Amino acid sequence: MGKSKVLRQAHRHGWIFGVIGLLAGGFLMVFVPSLTPVANSLFLFAGFHIVGAIVILATLWYGGLRDHFRHTSPLTPQLNFGWDRGWTVGLAIAALIATAFAVVLQVSAPEWWILACGMLLMGASWGVGFILMSGYRHADHAVLPMVDLLSGDSDVVLDAGCGAGRTTLALAGALRHGRIVAFDRFDAAYIEDGGRALLEHNLTLAGLKDRVQIETGDLAVLPFMDASFNSVVSTNVYDHLGSQRDQAMRETFRVMVPGGRFLLGISVWSWAMFAVASFLSFVVLSRRRTWRKLAERIGFTVDGEWMVNGTWFVLLRKPERIA
Ligand SMILES: C[S@@+](CC[C@H](N)C(=O)[O-])C[C@H]1O[C@@H](n2cnc3c(N)ncnc32)[C@H](O)[C@@H]1O
């Protein structure tokens, strides 16, 4: 849990007790005047909590809450990766409806408890899916398991399908001196206005404009020479490529140096994705072994794999010698 969340929870209770005390004391003063001593005690109780909350709040303000508001204020320029709330609210609504339905069913027809239980589980699952998908909007969600991805500090790395730069920023954090090429078709079907303007905005805010070269094109016909990149990163892109998938994988192989590594992050079938897409996830998402087989057919070897924030990452390597 982030520091600011802990801080917010810490002070919230003081205010709640204070307000409850005030309301209860006021109620007794007005409607039951004979209980004035009790009302006075409640006012004291409220005052104690409100003064306490003010002291805690002031301390927290200087201890980091000020930064939290600065980061969430609409007046402060924010990183924006284009994962609009519209992507996630459907899941929140579905979670609420399923949960409400379960409660109503349990109260009105307890003999249907199995159905109520099922609906409650669906509600919880969609709630988890909502939290998971909401995370995609944040920079710190794009944690890349970069173990052994980079061969040195001056690597040239391709972010294939960079979108608005979530992974580009994560990559820049690990690669202090090398060069990053952020490549995308900047397709309006995915990210608002294609994502290029958002990418430039994010790179400027993160102070990375000089270190990242932006290139536009199609992953199936990469406009780069053979062996141009030491490593490649790509998240949530290859699983969207449809019939272009194999060709894009071949192109990625071609532009990598022998011995180079490719960190591929995609949505595959998993419990995390079940929470997002429910039973549809069985149909629309492919299996890990499908991707491993494809990568091996192209010529990669599989060096490792991880689940991070609901995304499956597989680290592929182009052999030093190609048979
Ligand atoms: C779901 S977004 C992911 C963006 C980014 N990697 C991230 O994790 O936030 C998919 C991206 O793939 C890009 N894309 C899809 N098909 C492409 C293709 N054939 N060539 C280049 N980019 C493509 C889209 O423009 C979009 O920016």
Image (tube, grey):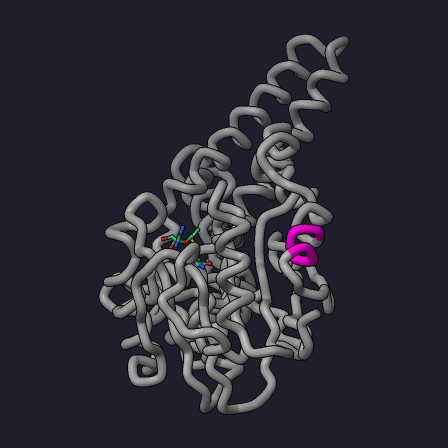
Q: Position of residue 232 (x, y in %)?
A: 52, 70
Q: Does residue 83 appear in the picture of this structure?
A: yes
Q: Quadrant of residue 70?
A: bottom left
Q: Quadrant of the C terminus?
A: bottom right
Q: Nearer the viewer, residue 78 or 203?
A: 203
Q: Position of residue 37 (x, y in %)?
A: 52, 49
Q: Is residue 199 left or right of residue 149?
A: left
Q: Quadrant of the N terminus?
A: bottom right
Q: Answer above or below: position of 23 versus 95.
A: below
Residue at image x 24%, y 62%? Answer: 197
Is 296 included in the stretch rendered in magenta? Answer: yes
Q: Main secondary structure of the magenta part?
A: helix
Which residue sits furthest front? 323
Is 182 included in the stretch rendered in magenta? Answer: no
* Start-end of magenta stretch: 293-297
Q: Does residue 11 appear in the picture of this structure?
A: no
Residue at image x 41%, y 70%? Answer: 68
Q: Is residue 36 left or right of residue 278?
A: left
Q: Nearer the viewer, residue 73 or 36?
A: 73
Q: Position of residue 137 (x, y in %)?
A: 43, 56
Q: Is residue 266 left or right of residue 217?
A: right
Residue at image x 64%, y 41%? Answer: 286
Picture mark count: 0
Q: Answer above or below: position of 26 versus 170.
A: above
Quadrant of ligand 1: it is bottom left
Residue at image x 60%, y 57%? Answer: 309
